[in-house]
Image: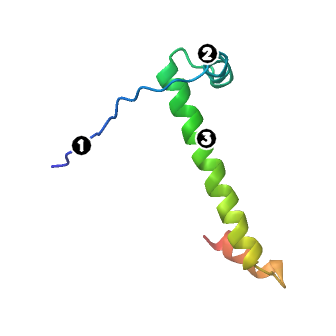
Amino acid sequence: MTYRIIFRMKVTAIIADDLINNVKLYTRSSTITEAITIALKDWINNYNIKELNKQIENNPIFIDNGQNIRDLNRAS
């Protein structure tokens, strides 16, 4: 049997109305909660991508022969 425990936090924040309205507009959300949730998830995803790009920049992957990788991809 699987149990899911969901924690939610109620937050009071003072945020400018025009900022909230823009977030609602750009996320196409009908509620402030949904809009902020989407915006925060998007921010976290962008942050993670930037961090991954830094890791790749410091330790790049060099491919001498792309045929080996194509063969591996086709085999799976």
Residue 73 percent location from the top left of the image: 68, 70
Residue type of the residue flagged with mark 1: Ile
The residue most toward the left is 1
Mark 3 lies on residue: 42
**Residue situated furthest front in the rendering:** 14
Q: Residues within 10 Å of mark 3 (few under 14, many from 20)?
A: few
Relative to 38, is 54 on the left or the right? right
- Residue 34 at least partly seen: yes
**Could you tell which of marks 3 and 1 lies nearer the N-terminus?**
1
Which residue is at a point 77% across and 72% down the rendered structure image? 57
Return the residue at label 1.
5
Distance (Cα) linking label 3 and label 1: 24 Å
Q: Vertical placement of 32 versus 51: above or below?
A: above
Marks 2/3 in contact by CB < 8 Å: the verdict is: no
Q: Are marks 3 and 1 in contact (CB under 8 Å)?
A: no
15, 55: nearer the viewer? 15
Q: Amino acid at mark 2?
A: Asp
Q: Amino acid at mark 3?
A: Asp
Crowding near the residue tagged with mark 2, few <14, some 14–19, many ≥20 C-alpha atoms within 10 Å: few
* Numbered disc in front, either 1 or 2: 2
Which of 23 and 16 lies nearest the eye of the viewer? 16
Q: Residue 17 shows which numbered tag?
A: 2
Precedes in sequence: disc 2 or disc 3: 2
Q: Name the residue rendered at 51%, 32% in the picture.
A: 37
At mark 2, the secondary structure is: helix
Q: Residues within 10 Å of mark 1 (few under 14, many from 20)?
A: few
From the top left corner, tell me how far across and down residue 40 is, in percent: 55, 38
Badge 1 marks a residue whose secondary structure is loop
Q: Which of pointers 1 and 2 lies earlier in the amino acid sequence?
A: 1
Q: Position of residue 47 (x, y in %)?
A: 64, 53
Identify the image quadrant of residue 4.
Answer: top left
> Residue at horizontal 81%, vertical 81%?
63
